[in-house]
Structure formats: structure tokens, C-alpha cells
């Protein structure tokens, strides 16, 4: 058997495996999209007929937008995701830089302690965060007459999630890839540590920061359990919570409408990822070296 034939056989196997994996991971979304754009719902439980739209149209999408407060949910998710990204990036950059570039006693132990929190399930923090938010909210309400932070506030949703070990680890690894000569040159020019961080390290690490922003957006956009616990007012629900409550409640009888809601809720993240995927890939490449 010649080498070229063996190589062709290996490539065929690799591509066949990748195509099979792609179909396996995307078929739920393909099915949901097909059902959502089928105005005739008679074939949605047939295989493979359900994967081919029947009487294509946008009727179910229009019903999702008009019958439930979709725009309000979308705005709430955008606000929560925006502030989650901003605070996560700031905290991760501020924590990652000293761990990567400064020398101080206990640096290794601090980093191990931060990484160790990645082993804990997020559900462990629900009760402590809930109790803390309640007391903080009561404090602000008594002090200034307004619950700036606390239960049933947007800040109560995103603040407990912004200091994550993954973001700090990602930024530490990215900062360690930057040549020391660049930092030494800035110090020779009289730059302080914060100036080096924001004027040298951050611009050079832009792809990694973009990757962190994408990861954070996906997590914040799809977050369901914590938002459902903290928020009690329907007008503050993000997409995941609002759509779930409405589409499993009064509109649960319409499978087509549920599928249209799922597609609409995923669409913003897919669009964002499509425009930023090159930063995502290059950012991860720099972080894992």
C-alpha cells in the first residue's frame, strides 16, 4: 500500500469523523430551525421529514415577538450581558497581570487557590450569594433609600459572576506570552505598572480579551438558574428565564412557537460569534501556548 493511498485514507477518515461530529452536535438546532419556519406543523414529529420545512414562513417568529414581551427580554439580556462582560474583563485583566508579571510572596499559592475554585460546581455559591445580596440590598435601601444592588436587580445577576477563575487564568496565560523586553522598555521610559498594563499589555492582548468577552457573553446570555432565583419581577427577566416561563406556560401547547423562541434566543450569540470568531481563535491560540 503506497504512502499516498494511506494518507488519502487517513484524511477521508478524519473528514468523515468531523462531518459525523458536526451533524451530531448541530442536528437539534437544525431541527428546531426547520420546525420554526414550517407554518404547517403536521410533520414536526416525522423523521427525516421534520428536517425539511413544510410551507416555509415566519409566522411562528412573528407570534413569539408579538405574543410575549420578547423585546423586553432581549433588552434585559443585553444589559446583563454587557455589564457582565465589562466587569469580567476588567477584573480578569487586573488580576491576571500581577500573577503573570509581578513577583511577590505567595503568588503561586494565590494562583492555585483561584484555579481550585474551578473545581467547585457553581451551585455551591447560590445560597451564600443569595444571603449576601439580600443583606447588601437591605443596607443600600436603608442608607440611600434605593436598592442599587441586591435581590431583583440587574446588578444582583451579574456581580456575583464577574470574578471568575477562568478569565483570570486566560489573561495570565496571555500576559505571559508578551516579551519581557517590551515591558522593560516601558519601564525605562518611566511608565508605572498601571500604565504598562493599560497602554502596553492590554492592546497587545486584544485577541485574548476578545476571546474572554465571547466566552463571557455566551455564559451570561444563557445563564438561567441564578437569574431565575435572583429576579422576581417579570419585567426584569432575561431571555432565557422569560422565554422558558412563557413558552412552557401559556404557549406550551405550540411546539412550533417553542422552537421559534429557541432559535430567536440563540440567534444574537451566533451572529456575535460569526463576526468575532477570528479573534476567538487567535485569542485561544495565544492563551494555550
Image (cartoon, rainbow, N blue to C red):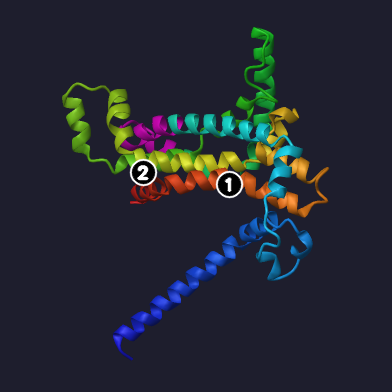
Camera sees residue 9: yes
Secondary structure at badge 2 equals helix
* In front: label 2 or label 1: 1
The structure residue drawn at horizontal position 54% and vertical position 44%, both measured from the top left corner, is 269
Q: Which residue is mark 1?
A: 267
Residue 192, picture quadrant: top left
Q: Which residue extends farthest bottom?
A: 1
Secondary structure at badge 1 equals helix
Residue 198, picture quadrant: top left
Camera sees residue 115: no
Does residue 199 appear left or right of residue 211 in this picture? Answer: left
Q: Residues within 10 Å of mark 1 (few under 14, many from 20)?
A: few
The structure residue drawn at horizontal position 54% and vertical position 70%, both measured from the top left corner, is 20
Find the distance from the CA under tag 2 to the CA under tag 1. 31 Å
Q: Nearer the viewer, residue 280 or 36?
A: 36
What's the magenta region? Answer: 91-113
Q: Nearer the viewer, residue 95 or 218?
A: 218
In which quadrant will I find the N terminus? bottom left
Most prominent secondary structure in the magenta stretch? helix
Could you say where residue 275 lies in the image, as x and y percent from the top left?
44, 45
The structure residue drawn at horizontal position 70% and vertical position 25%, both measured from the top left corner, is 152
Could you say where residue 138 lies in the image, as x and y percent from the top left?
69, 16
Q: Nearer the viewer, residue 15 or 55?
A: 55
Q: Residue 95 colored magenta?
A: yes
Does residue 139 appear left or right of residue 214 in this picture? Answer: right
Could you say where residue 98 lies in the image, as x and y percent from the top left?
35, 32
Q: What numbered label is drawn on residue 173?
A: 2
Amino acid at each position: 500500500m503506497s504512502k499516498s493511498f494511506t494518507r488519502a485514507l487517513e484524511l477521508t477518515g478524519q473528514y468523515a469523523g468531523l462531518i459525523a461530529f458536526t451533524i451530531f452536535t448541530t442536528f437539534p438546532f437544525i431541527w428546531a430551525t426547520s420546525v420554526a419556519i414550517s407554518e404547517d406543523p403536521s410533520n414536526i414529529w416525522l423523521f427525516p421529514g421534520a428536517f425539511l420545512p413544510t410551507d416555509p414562513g415566519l409566522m411562528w417568529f412573528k407570534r413569539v415577538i408579538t405574543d410575549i414581551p420578547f423585546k423586553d427580554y432581549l433588552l434585559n439580556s443585553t444589559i446583563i450581558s454587557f455589564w457582565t462582560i465589562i466587569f469580567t474583563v476588567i477584573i480578569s485583566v487586573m488580576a491576571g497581570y500581577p500573577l503573570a508579571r509581578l513577583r511577590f510572596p505567595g503568588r503561586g499559592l494565590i494562583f492555585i487557590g483561584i484555579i481550585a475554585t474551578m473545581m467547585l460546581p457553581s451551585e455551591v455559591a447560590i445560597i451564600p450569594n443569595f444571603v449576601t445580596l439580600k443583606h447588601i440590598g437591605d443596607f443600600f435601601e436603608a442608607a440611600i433609600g434605593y436598592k442599587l444592588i441586591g435581590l431583583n436587580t440587574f446588578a444582583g445577576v451579574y456581580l456575583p459572576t464577574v470574578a471568575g477563575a477562568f478569565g483570570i487564568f486566560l489573561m495570565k496565560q496571555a500576559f505571559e506570552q508578551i516579551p519581557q523586553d517590551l515591558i522593560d522598555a516601558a519601564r525605562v521610559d518611566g511608565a508605572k505598572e498601571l500604565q504598562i498594563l493599560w497602554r502596553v499589555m492590554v492592546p497587545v492582548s486584544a485577541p485574548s480579551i476578545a476571546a474572554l468577552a465571547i466566552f463571557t457573553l455566551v455564559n451570561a446570555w444563557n445563564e438561567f438558574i441564578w437569574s431565575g432565583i435572583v429576579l422576581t419581577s417579570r419585567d426584569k427577566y432575561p431571555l432565557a428565564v422569560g422565554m422558558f416561563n412563557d413558552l412552557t406556560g401559556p404557549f406550551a401547547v405550540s411546539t412550533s412557537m417553542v422552537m421559534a423562541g429557541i432559535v430567536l434566543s440563540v440567534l444574537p450569540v451566533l451572529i456575535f460569534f460569526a463576526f468575532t470568531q477570528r479573534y476567538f481563535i487567535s485569542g485561544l491560540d495565544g492563551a494555550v501556548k
